[in-house]
Amino acid sequence: MTNELDAGARNIVVIGTSAGGVQALIALFANLPADLPVAYLVVLHIPAHEPSVLHSIPGRVTAMRVVAAQDGQRIEARTVYVAIADRHLMLTEAGIRLTRGPKECRARPAVDVLFRSAAVNYGARVIGVILSGALDDGTAGLWAVKDRGGLTYVQEPAEAMLGSMPESAIAHVDIDLVGTIAVLANALASAVGQPIAGLPSHAVRDRHLIENIISLKGNGLEAGVMGLGKV
């Protein structure tokens, strides 16, 4: 069984969550088949001042390999990559990058950063999932995923411990599916591996490229941030 990811299929799932996210992640991975040809990347808001052991938690309920993300890793199928404290988790064409770019939504790691980087580099291969959390991190990133032809899934706010992040995404993004954790897991199992050939081509927006470079390199002026609008 190869761990290589097919470049012509939906097989990159990015997951964002905050308060209530540990329980949501446990439930999601407990419901997901372990043999799907997909890579999962997870951001949960965690304190910056202490090491995170979050990566050890999903491993209790899934047979997939679950690891703390490392800079320079290649992404492989049947593997879950979890963001570490005080570093943005980003996805480039070469694999994973961990950066200390500016906080977004007052968070590092931030959900928007992961989602946007995946959308910019992998387009329609990406499925974005927003789970329980406060405020609105993930909404802009999910918009970028949708903008590039990816799929957008959101946990039913009534089921989430905190419904603010799901509610914000639903209010601002054309969501493909709103459902309970069990419904989302079934939908992911069905969508993974679907070919992307023939899907509409969606070019990368300039603002998403600029924002992605800022998160990667940290130099907003060099990246062209002044071109995004008036100060």
Image (cartoon, helix red, strand yellow):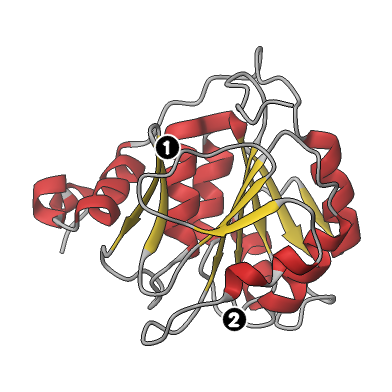
The N terminus, quarter of image: top right
* Residue nearest the observer in this picture, 178 or 101: 101
Q: Position of residue 30 (x, y in %)?
A: 85, 62
Quadrant position of residue 151: top right
In this image, 166 relative to 89: left or right? right
Q: Residues within 10 Å of mark 1 (few under 14, many from 20)?
A: many
Name the residue carrying label 1. 120
Label 1 is placed on what type of residue?
Answer: Val
Q: Who's the residue at 71% across and 19% down the image?
A: 195
Q: Secondary structure at mark 2?
A: loop
Label 2 is placed on what type of residue?
Answer: Ala
Q: Who's the residue at 31% across and 44% down the image?
A: 207
* Residue nearest the observer in this picture, 141 or 43: 43
Numbered label attached to residue 92: none
- In the rendered view, tell whether residue 133 sits above or below residue 211: below
Q: Position of residue 82 (x, y in %)?
A: 55, 61
In this image, 150 relative to 163: left or right? left
The C terminus, quarter of image: bottom left
Q: Secondary structure at mark 1?
A: helix
Q: Which residue ends up furthest to the front in the rendered image? A: 1
Answer with mark 1 or mark 2, whichever residue precedes in sequence: 1
Name the residue carrying label 2. 134
Q: Are dots 1 and 2 in contact, CB under 8 Å?
A: no
Q: Who's the residue at 70% across and 82% down the image?
A: 162
Q: Position of residue 228 (x, y in %)?
A: 23, 50
Q: Which residue ends up furthest to the top in the rendered image? A: 198
Residue 121 in sight here:
yes
- In the rendered view, tell whether residue 116 sits above or below residue 131: above
Q: How far apart in space, not on screen, are marks 1 and 2 (Cα)?
A: 25 Å
